[in-house]
């Protein structure tokens, strides 16, 4: 079972439905204990970093997420759900993230319109289970004004007034700054890769 962490924020239902579409047993889960019993966890997120971080703590799902990651279970953070894995974001100064990944989320280049709301091509970096079978230049759908810092965990970027982090992977921890559930066949293939990792 893949638990879609339900902390009252974001595109929860669309992420659940996309996973169910590719045949996964995906369910919205708000109970931290039930999250811990899942075979994999998806953390979606839409909106601003601060409210999402506070909602995650309020529901107690922050501890459940940390436990899942510590146990090495498959985990997929989407959009702000990815950003929450970092130490913080300049969008919400003083608001702490989970700190699972190092660094601070920062605004995308000021030379470009913010937010980036468009399809954009992914440029892969190294070998990635997340991007397996997606082809050399897959397109994904972005809606965001902030993005994670570059680092060893980055497996894909996009070009938006410069190099912008698009996807990260560190063992069973995956993250997408774009929305797989809105990225057509490419996004569904990526979610299928995640479901396979949960089996």
Image: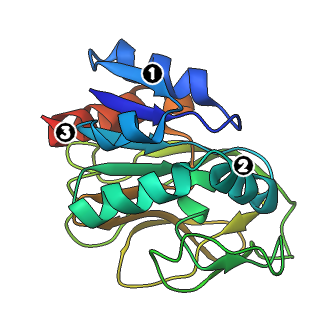
Residue position for label 1: 18
Left or right side of 73 for 146: right
Q: Position of residue 71 (x, y in %)?
A: 23, 60
Q: Position of residue 27 (x, y in %)?
A: 42, 21
Residue 55, which numbered label? 2
Marks counted in the figure total 3
Q: Residues within 10 Å of mark 3 (few under 14, many from 20)?
A: some
Q: CA distance from mark 1 to mark 2?
A: 23 Å
Asked if residue 74 can be seen in this view, the reply is yes
- The quadrant in which residue 126 appears is bottom left
Left or right side of 147 for 108: right
Asked if residue 122 can be seen in this view, the reply is no
Q: Are marks 1 and 2 in contact (CB under 8 Å)?
A: no
| Label 1 element class | helix
| 88 vs 113: above or below | below
Residue position for label 3: 198
């Amino acid at each position: 079972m893949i638990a879609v962490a339900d902390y009252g924020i974001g595109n929860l239902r669309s992420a659940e439905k996309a996973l169910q579409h590719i045949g996964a047993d995906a369910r919205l889960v708000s109970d931290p204990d039930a999250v811990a019993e899942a075979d994999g966890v998806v953390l979606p997120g839409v909106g601003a970093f601060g409210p999402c971080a506070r909602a995650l703590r309020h529901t107690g799902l922050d501890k459940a997420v940390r436990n899942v990651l510590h146990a090495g279970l498959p985990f997929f953070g989407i959009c702000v759900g990815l950003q929450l894995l970092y130490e913080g974001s300049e969008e919400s100064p003083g608001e702490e993230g989970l700190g699972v990944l190092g660094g601070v989320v920062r605004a995308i280049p000021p030379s470009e319109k913010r937010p980036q709301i468009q399809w954009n091509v992914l440029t892969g970096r190294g070998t990635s289970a997340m991007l397996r079978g997606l082809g050399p230049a897959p397109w994904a759908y972005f809606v965001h004004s902030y993005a994670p810092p570059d680092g060893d965990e980055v497996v894909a970027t996009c070009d938006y007034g410069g190099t912008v982090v698009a996807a990260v992977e560190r063992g069973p921890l995956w993250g997408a700054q774009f929305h797989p559930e809105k990225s057509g066949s490419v996004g569904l293939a990526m979610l299928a890769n995640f479901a396979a990792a949960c089996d």
